[in-house]
Amino acid sequence: MELVEVKLPTEQNNPKKRGTNWTSEEEILLIEEVLKYEETLFGKMKGSGVKGKHGKLKESTWKSIAETLNLSYKNDRDNDTVKKKFNNIKQRGKEKIDMLRRPKTGGGPAPSSLTASEDALMQAFEGRPQICGLPDGIDTDAT
């Protein structure tokens, strides 16, 4: 009987490379670029045949933002990484703002302050409509 060695794909055979860390300047440039093309990336397109065209337009816009970042900071980030980073900054910034406005009761650590990039994004979003709870926090049907 002959033994056959089977090689399974492992991290040694197929290593995943970790990307370089984002600097705060790079994050701020990302936010500036996204806000510059905000209508294209997040706005509604009208007309016939929009679904296919709009997706391609969004994709090419994210690619151009990634190229701008890569040229400025000599990195090799793709458009999916850039898009994910922007969404993460936006989500974490909103969570921190919410914690600062309505701190949890019961002690615990103080909420962390906003980073420079989160602060820049939240200043850009200031004055825009947002969903918030009732001021008194009680909603009843009683008259």
Image (spheres, rainbow, N blue to C red):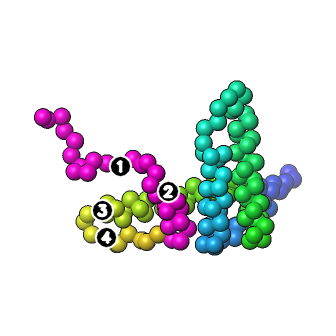
Q: Is residue 45 left or right of residue 110?
A: right
Front residue (pair 110, 141): 141
Assign a secondary structure to mark 3.
loop
Q: Give the magenta range.
A: 115-143
Mark 3: which amino acid?
A: Lys
Of the image marks 1 and 3, the number of the one nearer the N terminus: 3
- Structural crowding at the residue carrying mark 3, measured as other residues with C-alpha within 10 Å and reported as few (<14), some (14–19) or many (≥20): few
Say whether residue 59 is visible.
yes
Label 4 belongs to which residue?
A: 108
Q: Nearer the viewer, mark 2 or mark 4?
A: 2
Is 62 rendered above or below residue 109? above
Label 2 belongs to which residue?
A: 125
Is 49 rendered above or below residue 102? above
Mark 2: which amino acid?
A: Phe
Q: Tell me whether circle 1 and circle 4 mark residues in contact (CB < 8 Å).
A: no
Q: How far separated are the C-alphas under marks 1 and 4?
A: 24 Å
Question: Residue 123: within the magenta?
Answer: yes
Label 1 belongs to which residue?
A: 132
Say whether residue 12 is visible.
no
Residue 96, position in %: x, y? 43, 63
Of the image marks 2 and 3, the number of the one nearer the N terminus: 3
Assign a secondary structure to mark 4.
loop
Say which mark, if any, is on residue 104.
3
